[in-house]
Amino acid sequence: MSDLVTGDAVVLGLRPARLPSRALAIFLDLLVYITGYLIISIGLALATASLDPAAQAAVSVASFLLVLVGVPIAVETLSHGRSLGKLACGLRVVRDDGGPIRFRHALVRGAMGVVELLGTFGAIACIASLISARGRRLGDVFAGALVVRERAPGVRVMPLPPPPPWLAGRFSGLDLSAVPDGLWLAIRQYLTRMNQLDPQVGAAMAVRLADDLVARTGAPAPVGVPAAAFLMAVVHERQSRDAARAFGGGAPAYAPPVAPAYAPPAVPGPMPDAWGQQGPGAYVPPAVAPATPPVPVPGEMPATGAPPRPATGFAPPG
């Protein structure tokens, strides 16, 4: 890693390219440029056969500077430091502060490359790259540039263990909006490495993470559910909500329950707990009969101008 500091005091962790990858990228670039130069030189030699030797020499020098110096500078400027060889090797030229290079950086690198790469067949560039701590050649030093690796080695992501089947869908009504990203990361790291920890240490960590998660959600912990299984089920619920948001038309992750207009009076009996589970023999209130309008009494007239009384759902007494 190379700790580069930008103008905003942000530390960039960049991977400087070393000599083998840079040499392969330069070899691919030179192979393309020299092939193009030979084709153009043959064409110009046939086209300028009638000219005098001085004119032919001038055309040859101009084609050399155009193809082997001007084209690499133009390619690095337009592609922001990604030539064909660097693209194949996963490299890129950036400034010392991590930003994309401009024409002046490419011009200095190209001009120095004539001496380092073409004039000495890469000997000066190899020595300078071996001596430099970040693998830079003289053109990079004078231009204030750095060749970095864009494609880092892949890191194997450990899959999360699935929750127990009897916990599937149990936490669908849990509000997870107040859980910070740092806590999610800590839970994920624990679940992916729980089998590698000491059983006592792993159990203690699971209990501590479960307590933090319960404190963030505001709902009491379920009774009889192990802490690790609770963490698996909640993380699985969060992943299901993220997948539904991404692929299911943007459904909201959490919808608070809406209170009904009328709730029947509570009666003694087992009631559902905070996690939406009902015990055996729970009481289900019977359906309330629809209200019937009162029968008018003969001889009485309704009051005029009185606002109509809103319906409450209750039947008037007989």
Image (cartoon, helix red, strand yellow):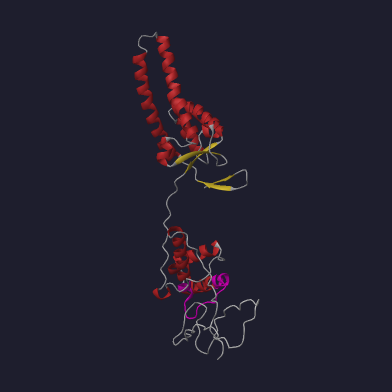
Q: Is residue 106 above or below residue 293?
A: above
What is the residue that sits farthest to the bottom in this orientation? 318
Q: What is the tally of numbered marks visible in this picture?
A: 0
Q: Is residue 170 found left or right of 39 in the rendered image? A: right
Q: Is residue 190 above or below residue 268?
A: above
From the viewer's side, name the closer residue of 289 and 1. 289
Q: Position of residue 295 (x, y in %)?
A: 55, 86
Q: Position of residue 54 (x, y in %)?
A: 42, 10
Q: Is residue 250 above or below residue 34?
A: below
Q: Position of residue 156 (x, y in %)?
A: 41, 56
**Image quadrant of residue 167?**
bottom left
| Residue at left offset 43%, top offset 24% | 67
**Image quadrant of residue 7?**
top right
Check residue 214 for magenta coloring.
Answer: yes
Q: Is residue 244 found left or right of 95 in the rendered image? A: left
| Residue at left offset 41%, top offset 76% | 166
Q: Is residue 268 found left or right of 55 in the rendered image? A: right
Question: What is the span of residues highlighted in magenta in the rendered image?
Answer: 211-230
Check residue 240 for magenta coloring.
Answer: no
What is the residue that sits farthest to the front in this orientation? 299
Quarter of the picture containing the C terminus is bottom right
Q: Position of residue 59 (x, y in %)?
A: 42, 15
